[in-house]
């Protein structure tokens, strides 16, 4: 692991933070009907203290709130993807590798099937059921690791994939037993969404996400040693068991919180860490924070694309679909697949 200079670290982080700031400044002016309220109109209403105007409501209460949710989800998926790829020494690992998204999706589908329609602390019954489903999967994985203290990454991956396959089978069963209305709701949720506007739904998850982000970033030095091999890391004072459990628990919990609010959003946790590693290298002291920041910007821009695309389609076709937006999971796949294939072509193989 080559020396990471302070200038390189802070220069890279400053550039990423700068990109994040640009996204926040522009976001109040981007939506499905971007010609109605521009970003200058929105900021002018804020500076003038005109908080009851249409420009302020659209720009900040709707658009900026949505972008903040996209940043929250993107930061989490980018960071957790980098952690899992390092922990499993597998460039194909994602935040969903251990079956968290499958457990969360199964919980959400059961809530839809049972017709649960209550809320708690601003979170819907579907979000809460999704989070509980993810927790069950995480708990089962932890029970397995507790039973076998020397379980390696290959066994963890196998356990996660097995749990994911089981949950996927149960999801198919729930879908098969659902009526047309329930099936539509299930399919729509599985596409992922950033429609949970405002802070009521995103704020509760942020309480869990912030500690998880901090704890995962603090594991960077240990993960650098872990990349050299478990024996080498242990000889240098790294507590392998504690490192694995910390990364496993908090990355999974953070991912579960995002899935509960936004549904499954693919490719961010896979492509962003790979893209970041290709540009900056695999030093976790830089890779983890950069993947988090780039992930936030990437998902926010994909969300802009999802809204602009529907606005353009409405203008071209004359339909009334301008108030809608493409599911964010669809857009990240459309954008992420070409990036992934380009990276695959350039590197030949993602194997370590």
Image (tube, rainbow, N blue to C red):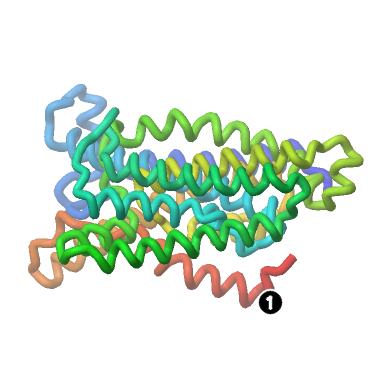
Residue 295 lies left or right of residue 124; in this view the side is right
Q: Is any part of residue 269 visible from this angle? A: no
Q: How many marks?
A: 1
Lateral position of residue 320 relative to residue 47, left or right: left
Query: In the displayed structure, does residue 317 sit left or right of residue 241?
Result: left
Determine if residue 187 is in view.
Answer: yes
Q: Position of residue 339 (x, y in %)?
A: 52, 68
- Residue, x 41% and y 62% (percent of image)? 332
Q: Relative to residue 244, is residue 332 depicted above or below?
A: below
Q: Give the secondary structure at mark 1.
A: loop
Residue 157, percent from left and from top: 63, 59
Question: Dividing the picture into quarters, in which one does residue 180 lie?
Answer: bottom left
Quarter residue 222 falls in = top right
Q: Quadrant of residue 188?
A: bottom left
User: Is disc 1 surrounded by few (<14), some (14 to 19) or many (20+) residues within 10 Å?
Assistant: few
Residue lying farthest to the right in this orientation: 235
- State the residue lying farthest toward the front: 147
Which residue lies at the image location 26% right of the left edge and 47% below the top edge?
195
- In the displayed orientation, state which residue is furthest to the top: 49
Q: Position of residue 301 (x, y in %)?
A: 39, 54
Q: Residue at position x 51%, y 40% from top?
A: 253
Residue behind mark 1: 348
**Percent position of residue 118, x then y:** 21, 37
Towards the viewer: 41 or 317: 317
User: As rendered, which of 226 and 176 lies closer to the eye?
Assistant: 176
Side of 287 where 195 appears, left or right: left
Residue situated in front as seen by the camera: 143 or 209: 143
The quadrant of the rendering that contains the C terminus is bottom right
Q: Residue at x 66, y 56 (%)?
A: 277
């Amino acid at each position: 692991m080559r020396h990471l200079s302070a200038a390189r670290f802070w220069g890279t982080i400053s550039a990423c933070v700068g990109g994040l700031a640009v996204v926040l400044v522009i976001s109040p002016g981007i939506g499905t009907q971007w010609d109605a309220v521009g970003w200058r109109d929105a900021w002018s209403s804020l500076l003038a203290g005109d908080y009851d105007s249409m420009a302020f409501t659209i720009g900040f209460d709707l658009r900026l709130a949505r972008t903040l949710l996209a940043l929250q989800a993107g930061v989490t998926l980018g960071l957790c993807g980098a952690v899992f790829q390092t922990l499993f020494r597998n460039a194909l690992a994602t935040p969903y590798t251990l079956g968290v998204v499958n457990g969360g999706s199964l919980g959400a589908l059961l809530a839809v099937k049972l017709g649960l329609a209550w809320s708690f602390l601003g979170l819907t019954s579907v979000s809460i059921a999704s989070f509980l489903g993810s927790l069950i999967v995480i708990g089962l994985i932890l029970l397995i690791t507790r039973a076998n203290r020397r379980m390696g990454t290959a066994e963890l991956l196998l356990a996660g994939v097995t749990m994911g396959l089981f949950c996927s089978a149960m999801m198919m069963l729930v879908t098969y037993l659902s009526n047309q209305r329930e099936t539509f709701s299930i399919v729509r949720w599985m596409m992922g969404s950033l429609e949970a506007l405002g802070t009521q739904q995103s704020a509760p998850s942020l309480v869990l996400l912030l500690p998880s982000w901090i704890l995962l970033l603090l594991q960077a030095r240990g993960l650098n040693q872990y990349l050299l091999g478990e024996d080498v890391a242990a000889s240098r004072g790294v507590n392998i068991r504690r490192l694995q459990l910390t990364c496993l628990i908090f990355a999974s919990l953070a991912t579960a919180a995002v899935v509960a609010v936004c549904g499954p959003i693919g490719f961010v946790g896979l492509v962003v860490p790979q893209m970041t590693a290709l540009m900056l290298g695999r030093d976790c002291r830089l890779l983890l924070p950069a993947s988090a920041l780039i992930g936030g910007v990437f998902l926010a821009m994909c969300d802009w694309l999802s809204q602009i695309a529907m606005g353009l389609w409405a203008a071209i076709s004359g339909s009334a679909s301008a108030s809608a937006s493409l599911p964010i999971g669809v857009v990240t796949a459309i954008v992420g697949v070409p990036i992934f294939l380009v990276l695959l072509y350039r590197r030949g193989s993602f194997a370590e």
